[in-house]
Image (cartoon, helix red, strand yellow):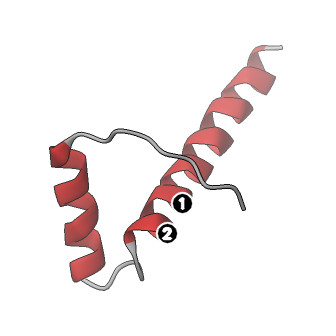
Amino acid sequence: MKLITCHIPEAYIEGIEELVNKNLYPNRSEVIRIAIRDLLKSELSSLSRRD
């Protein structure tokens, strides 16, 4: 896995923290990984349907 740095709005961080505090995810990194995975699946499948 590679490490990247990005700037995230405070409101997003608060939402991520809420998910972690409610024990829905083990940590912030996992929330972000899953969000990116789901976005990529959705966007890439939309692109393939257009072709």
- Drawn side of residue 50 relative to residue 37, left or right: right
Tag on residue 47?
none
Q: Please name the residue that numbered disc 1 is placed on.
A: 34
Element class at badge 1: helix
Residue at 22% from the left image edge and 80% from the top image edge: 21
Q: Considering depth in this image, is 5 or 27 the residue closer to the camera?
A: 5
Mark 1 touches mark 2? (CB < 8 Å) = yes
> Where residue 39 sits in the image (x, y, percent)?
55, 42
Residue at 31% from the left image edge and 42% from the top image edge: 8
Disc 2 residue type (three-letter): Glu
The nearer-to-camera label among 1 and 2 is 2
Q: Residues within 10 Å of mark 2 (few under 14, many from 20)?
A: few
Disc 1 residue type (three-letter): Ile
> Where residue 16 sits in the image (x, y, percent)?
28, 61
Q: Please name the residue that numbered disc 2 is placed on.
A: 30
Quarter of the image for the N terminus: give it: bottom right
- Drawn side of residue 40 relative to residue 11, left or right: right
> Where residue 26 sits in the image (x, y, percent)?
42, 83
Residue at 17% from the left image edge and 46% from the top image edge: 10
- Drawn side of residue 32 relative to residue 37, left or right: left
> Where residue 37 sits in the image (x, y, percent)?
61, 52
